[in-house]
Amino acid sequence: MADALITPEVLKGFRDYLPEQMLARERLMETARDVYRRYGFAPIDTPALEYSRILLGKGGDESDKQLFRFTDQGERDVAMRFDLTVPLARFVAQHVHEVGLPFKRYHLATVWRAEKPQKGRYREFMQCDFDTIGSESNAADIETLLVIHDLLSAIGFERFQIRVNNRRILNGVLAGLGLSGQTAAVLRALDKLAKVGVDAVVEEMTAKAGATESQARQVLEIARPGIGWDELKQALNGNDEGLKGFDSLKELFDVAIAAGVSPERLQLDVSIARGLDYYTGTIYETFLTDLPGIGSVCSGGRYDNLAGLFTKEKLPGVGASLGLDRLLAAMEELGLLKNGKTPAAVFIPYFESTRLADYHRVARALRAAGLGVEVFPEARALGKQLKYADKKRHAIALIAGSDEFAAGVWQVKDLRNGTSQKVAESELTATIQALLE
Amino acid sequence: MADALITPEVLKGFRDYLPEQMLARERLMETARDVYRRYGFAPIDTPALEYSRILLGKGGDESDKQLFRFTDQGERDVAMRFDLTVPLARFVAQHVHEVGLPFKRYHLATVWRAEKPQKGRYREFMQCDFDTIGSESNAADIETLLVIHDLLSAIGFERFQIRVNNRRILNGVLAGLGLSGQTAAVLRALDKLAKVGVDAVVEEMTAKAGATESQARQVLEIARPGIGWDELKQALNGNDEGLKGFDSLKELFDVAIAAGVSPERLQLDVSIARGLDYYTGTIYETFLTDLPGIGSVCSGGRYDNLAGLFTKEKLPGVGASLGLDRLLAAMEELGLLKNGKTPAAVFIPYFESTRLADYHRVARALRAAGLGVEVFPEARALGKQLKYADKKRHAIALIAGSDEFAAGVWQVKDLRNGTSQKVAESELTATIQALLE
């Protein structure tokens, strides 16, 4: 052992989660798990390390460069996963006969990317994905929308909007205009609309997608958010692929609204371009009405073939991913986070040194009723202990010294407003539950 | 992209978790988190990767060899954490002024060790630790015992025993016998008792710890599980350190029992030797009465100084770690695992193709009442869908075709026993909740 101290520090681009942050993150993860499960999605997990050949070339050159990759003790070329989609593809190819199809899974896990660290971006972060594999049915797309909706509601957001598109609609529009095969170029141009304005987008479409100015303006007209169904259908001009996309999207809106989703939370948006080389049908993006600038907090879509590199079996699917870190940042900004440093609402000072068993006996009874109760571990001065409880933001202190023990009561102190009352032991649970409601 | 398929496989010593296994693991993790929180332990997280200098030399040569260690893109010497104790030491040294003392944290996270793979041992596994840092008070040791107890109960075990020791007792006994400084050698010999028998242990103590045969037999007498308090106190022969250990341990038993722990679940065992170079006071091991052979499922103890390599501040602490994988194996063997492949009890077949909105509307209403409900994504033949539900072990199918829709009822089919009843939509929640109870 060295005599000089080792500086305690984390790697560049990495971070510790302190209790306050971790409590918020765990709460969010629990909500996501809860909603996924209620829809029948089941959890899986895969190793953090995979053979490099499983991960390489799946996310493009940039992604390969960002892999934490090394040679292990057995001379194997290994790497840490950079997302949960490639491991899912490997997993489904390997286990499809065990898990059966359709396969609905969720996966909350850490991924690593050696990106250039910058504000709000880390080399280690958590992904929170759910997917339905092995079905081409639009019912799976509809369910994906419902999950996104119920997830945002369950987290506590009232004002949000899910923008939905179907890639085949724009394909159809472009085919109708004689611009087949230009979807990617058109979408790339459309994607810049908010940043560069209409004229610059028109210019890019004429330069890069072979459109005339009039065609480009027609595309822009159709691609505006909030276009009506009738207008959109007309623009498709009977194109078969476009109409198929249109019908799927229309059914998705109709069923979701009939199943109870508020129409204001949905928006048709033909311009959504996410995952250009990957998504082939429905596409989802979710924006917080009060914080649109942070971008989509839950995104996904339908893809034709998940695991083509690992199996000859064609596995279509649809799913989405909750942007956990982005959402936490948003919740902090909107004041939706409870700012405690403790998971326990109740604090019991260890005041009378011979009464530790009583403190623990009462604490255990309250815990059995579902309350969180911390007993301070040292018989210190009461003032010091209450200062600790304030700092940790416990809500209630439960105090008993010799007077209280003699009288058979406890002092219930609400630390949030300083009020205090004496309560019989048998009434403690009910009193505290009422105060915490 | 390559034309040849990549074989989908995981690295040697690693494994995928399929839904059935992962559901059990998540349930166990949730129980642990819940109990820790109710005691006021707060969660933290630390990076999977640390500077190698943080991790090296902390677990001995063997541990260093098992590190997944490499040079990252920035030429940093980095390694994946092999436990949660060293990261905790680094964390506390770094953040002590932010988190304050005493600091009660739990940490559920994955660790990696390039061990020789063997049955039941993996190179990637989850640890589930809780500790109280910064207090020398025996009240923290007592609370640790209560947490272990309530954790095992909450998981669903009725029959278990927590064996408790205080390292200072044996120190005292040995000092009384003139064998001061031989604690480690004596404990190493005692540790083999079950395997090699009394005579071999006596032989080792005489050979390695400088004891006479009579001394060795005296030690064995005291170190037998279930020795009485009076007998033990007498054996200490007034030794000061031994009596301090004795008093702490006695208080721990007295308070725990007064706080509601059943005495049969506790056992005094002076022979427990865990963590020879690390633990200095109380030591805990937990055995399942019906499966003693799998070893301790929750172990820990008190240590003098957590983070001496990182800070001059002396940080004593006490804590324990739940053996998640061992416990899962035990629960499987004891039939304590629910063997479902789905988190959703209720299954709704997508039967009438025009009625998807009704299926989803009802599913969402049931979910809002807390039920898990899966809607099948494809309008296939009913028989096929029910076969899928059977395979996944959904408990209840909720069936509605044209007849049921016409009559305003749903068929509630209990898939566990095949019984069926027709129920009005308004009664569905209550009916299903009653069936699931």
Image: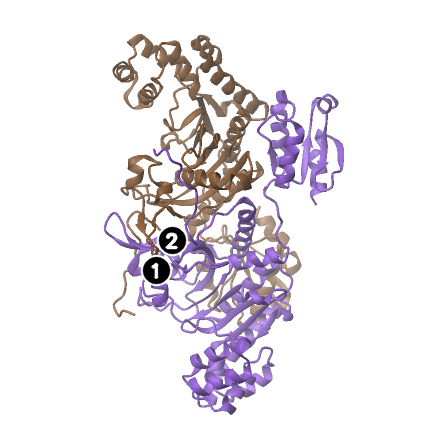
Chain colours: A purple, B brown
Q: Position of residue A434 (x, y in %)?
A: 72, 41
Instruction: Name the residue: 54% across, 20% down.
Output: B251
Of the residues shown, which amino acid type is indicated by label 2? Thr
| CA neighbours of label 2 inside 10 A, class few (<14), some (14 to 19), many (20+) | many
The chain identifier of the residue carrying mark 2 reads A
State the residue at coordinates (35%, 34%): A2
x 47%, y 91%: residue = A212
Q: Is residue B352 above or below residue B208?
A: below
Q: Position of residue A147 (x, y in %)?
A: 54, 62
Nearest to N terminus: mark 2 or mark 1: 2
Using the image as rendered, state which of residue B435 and residue A19 is in the foreground: A19
The amino acid beneath tag 1 is: Arg
Horizontal and vertical percent for residue A49?
A: 34, 53
Label 1: which residue? A90
Q: Are marks 2 and 1 on the same chain?
A: yes
Compare residues A382 and A397 and report the one nearer the observer: A382
Q: Compared with residue B268, is residue A216 higher up or lower down, i.e. above or below? A: below
Q: Are marks 2 and 1 in contact (CB under 8 Å)?
A: yes
Q: For mark 1, name the chain.
A: A
Which residue is at the front of the view, B143 or B263?
B143
Instruction: Say whether residue B237 is visible.
Output: yes
